[in-house]
Image: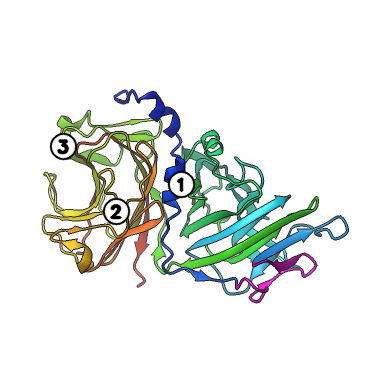
Amino acid sequence: MKRQIQRCGLMCTMLAAGLLSAAGQRQARCEDEAGLTTIFNGKDLEGWDGDPRLWSVVDGAIRGKTTKENPARGNTFCVWKGGRLKNFVLKLKFRIQNGNSGVQYRSTHHGDWRVGGYQAEVENNPGKVGFLYHERGRGWMTNVGDFMIVDKDGKKNVVGKVADVNALKEAGYYKMKDWNEYTITARGNHLVHDLNGYQTVEMIDDDPKGRAMEGILALQIHAGPPMVVEFKDIRVRHLKANYGEALRLFDGQTLDGWVTSAGDRLKETFSVEEGVLTVSGCPAGFIRTTQDYTNFVLRMQVRHVSRGNGGVLVRMATEDKLWPRSMEAQGMAGSMGDFYSIGEFRFEGPPERTTGRHIRKAHPSNEKPLGEWNSYEITLDGGDLEIAVNGLVQNTATQCEEVPGKIGLQSEGSLMEYRNIVLIPILSDE
């Protein structure tokens, strides 16, 4: 079906890339800080190790500085000595006056403050800052705006878009020579960079020989002309789950692996075009996976083209009826982050936010304006449920029934779009 949406010009132009307006950006900066541990004291380099000629602490920030008289001898790094990073959320702020730098993660020592591994790019170059590089490894990995899969033979394949580069630039996703905030998330072989609330890259690294699954954290000074770079507010949350290999549930081209709840009656309700799964909203029903999943992180980008209702169903273990016994991460515009039990699916929610089968979200809505892409993330680990919207944990529940089930997307009145639907399995520790 040709996309039913002959989008209003304003909505179409602004939003094809999934970007925030100024108001949306302010909303997205309200982020969940629970569990983040500060790893730089803001006073000195205790816990860090770098060439003392080049690294110091000035005005509460780690500063890397080179001059003509005091250059870097090749790329050099200030290394965090507090341990290794495996699965984590890392947040830090940086600014750079000139030159080139980066944030190294899951990296390895190569002697004399030299490091190799994944790198989140730092430089005054909108459209490039935010990309993913592999220092002393496979080089360039993922450009800003791309969803990349590196296959088992090391071949790099762009399979989708997480944003449009030109629209990112126009939205001012990067602040020239000012403080910017990186959020870097690594779960198993799945990596995401966000810069100032804008997703810049996503990558699934299936290359067993080239990828890094854990390693050290470090900050870079790049060889070359004189430069100054600064880092502060460095915080990390270690994720304890045992993650399996990430997989795309939606290939961006077909509905392979999905079936509708009412056969041909819904064949015009769900369609695919240009990497996007469109849900018309009428008639009511859902599309679901053919496979069952129990414990996982489910990530996707979703946007409302019109106001109305929708949702994501998980652990759906009954027949295809309206509505199947399951747990619903609410998709109604303005209510993303709410939770509903369907068919008396058992759970326990925070008493102050739970009424019957409904748990209200913990914070005011942080959704982006109508037509812009939101990040929606649903984690089920045993009996524990967590729902995050645009990086903010909006809901939790415990004692959820741990049963295998389908994953479904509802058609319930709202014209909605989904892309980059990724599942990261959570494996048993046994």
Q: Is residue 198 left or right of residue 77?
A: left
Specify the segment rendered in magenta. Answer: 41-60
SS assignment at label 3: loop
Circles 1 and 3 in contact, beta carbons < 8 Å: no
Residue found at x 52% / y 61%: 91
Question: Which residue in the protein does label 2 denote?
Answer: 337
Q: Quadrant of residue 125?
A: top right
Label 1 or label 2, whichever lies nearer to me, is: 1
Which amino acid is tagged 3?
A: Ala
The residue furthest bottom is 46
Q: Residue at x 46, y 36 (%)?
A: 17
Kind of residue at badge 2: Gly
Callout 2 crowding tier (Cα within 10 Å): few <14, some 14–19, many ≥20: many
Where is residue 139 drawn, in percent x and y? 65, 48
Badge 1: residue crowd in 10 Å (few <14, some 14–19, many ≥20): many
**Where is residue 417 shown, x and y percent of the image?**
33, 37
Mark 1 vs 2, N-terminal side: 1
| Residue hosting label 3 | 284
